[in-house]
Image (cartoon, rainbow, N blue to C red):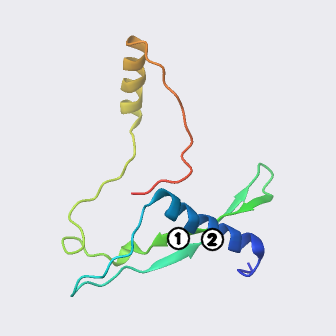
Amino acid sequence: MDLNEPSWVDAMHEELNQFEKLGVWMLVELPKGKKSLDTRWVYPNKLDDFGVIIRNKARLVVRGFRQIEGHDYTEVYAPVACLEAICIFLAYESYMNFIVYQMDVKRAFL
């Protein structure tokens, strides 16, 4: 993988532009006595059904494994729906004659 290749550079610029567009971060001064968390780039490839690379993707991720429970955070939350909750929701939707739409989320920030 050559990071000087235009497709990888474009993927990194797209990721950073999405951060700016969505306003998910702002630059602030680090409080005294606190250490910042490191980030790193992850470079997955999007493949088609035959395993051929159709797009290069770049994701900037935080190396959160360096956090200490109780010091850096106190709660953990995983936004995952269980199957029972989805079934209850769909049953209620059907009973109340609601319309449910499906969407594909391109970017999600916790």
Q: Is residue 31 left or right of residue 19?
A: left
Amino acid tagged 1: Leu
Instruction: Kindly state the secondary structure of the residue where label 1 is placed.
Output: strand
Query: Mark 2–mark 1 contact, CB under 8 Å?
Result: yes
Q: Position of residue 79 (x, y in %)?
A: 37, 48
Quarter where residue 30 is shown: bottom left
Q: Position of residue 68 (x, y in %)?
A: 26, 75
What is the spatial separation of the Cα atoms under label 2 and label 1, in whole angstroms?
8 Å
Residue assigned mark 2: 12
**Label located before the other in sequence (2 or 1):** 2
The single residue placed furthest to the bottom in the displayed view is: 33
Relative height, residue 90 to residue 43 (above, below):
above
Residue assigned mark 1: 60
Location of the C terminus (image quadrant): bottom left
Relative height, residue 62 to residue 22 (above, below):
below
The residue drawn where x is 77% and y is 48% is: 49
Q: Is residue 30 left or right of residue 95?
A: left
Instruction: Kindly state the secondary structure of the residue where label 2 is placed.
Output: helix
Amino acid tagged 2: Met
Q: Nearer the viewer, mark 2 or mark 1?
A: 2
The residue drawn where x is 52% and y is 70% is: 60
